[in-house]
Amino acid sequence: MFSRRAALGLIGSGISTFAIGRASAADYPARPVRWIVGYPPGGATDIIARLIGQRLSEKLGQQFVIENKPGAGNNIGTEAAINAEPDGYTVLLVIRRTTSTPRSTPI
């Protein structure tokens, strides 16, 4: 079983490796990247985004600006990302939540 620290390290290094591999061919990013987080500042998701954003900033040489847009079950942040300029400089952080609801009707 992974510890939380090991899991975060793997996530951060995986994202930065993917971004660096894709960025080297096109000199991406050439300007700061806007990273939209659909959760309030100070929470676990915000902290993860800031840690990964800091690592990406160090590796890619451009700033990753974390922009919190909480509310409406991530719909406000998602709408901001959808309405952003389609230039590749806006990123949306999405956390998949798994839930379990009991089935009230027989199959």
Image: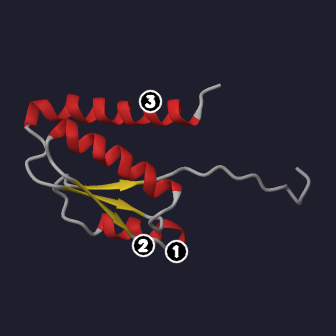
Query: Mark 3 or 2 closer to N-term?
Result: 3
Q: Which residue occupies 44% across, 49% down?
A: 48
In what element is the residue under mark 3? helix
Left or right of 107 on screen, residue 42:
left
| Tag 3 near tag 2, CB within 8 Å | no
| Residue under numbered circle 1 | 72
* Relative depth, front residue between 4 and 16: 4
Residue type for callout 3: Leu
> Rounded to the nearest whole Å, what is the CA distance between mark 3 and mark 2?
28 Å
Gap between marks 1 and 3, in whole Å? 30 Å
SS of the residue under disc 1: helix
Residue at (10%, 30%) from the top-left corner? 25
**Residue located beneath label 2 in the image:** 76
In this rendering, is residue 39 above or below 10?
A: below
Colour basis: secondary structure
Mark pair 1, 2: CA separation: 6 Å
Rendered location of residue 102, percent (x, y): 84, 55
Residue annotated with mark 3: 10
* Helix, strand or loop status at disc 2: helix
Q: Earlier in the sequence, mark 1 or mark 3?
A: 3
Q: Are marks 1 and 2 in contact (CB under 8 Å)?
A: yes
Which is nearer the eye, 5 or 7? 5
Q: Amino acid at mark 1?
A: Ala
> Of residues 75 and 29, which is closer to you in this image?
29
Q: Position of residue 95 (x, y in %)?
A: 51, 51
**Residue 61 spot, x, y in % from top left:** 14, 42
State which mark lies toward you, 3 or 2: 3
Q: Is residue 104 left or right of residue 37?
A: right
Pointer 3 local density, CA inside 10 Å: few below 14, some 14–19, many at least 20: few
Determine the residue located farthest toward the top in the rendered image: 1
Badge 2 local density, few (<14 within 10 Å), some, or many (20+)? Answer: some
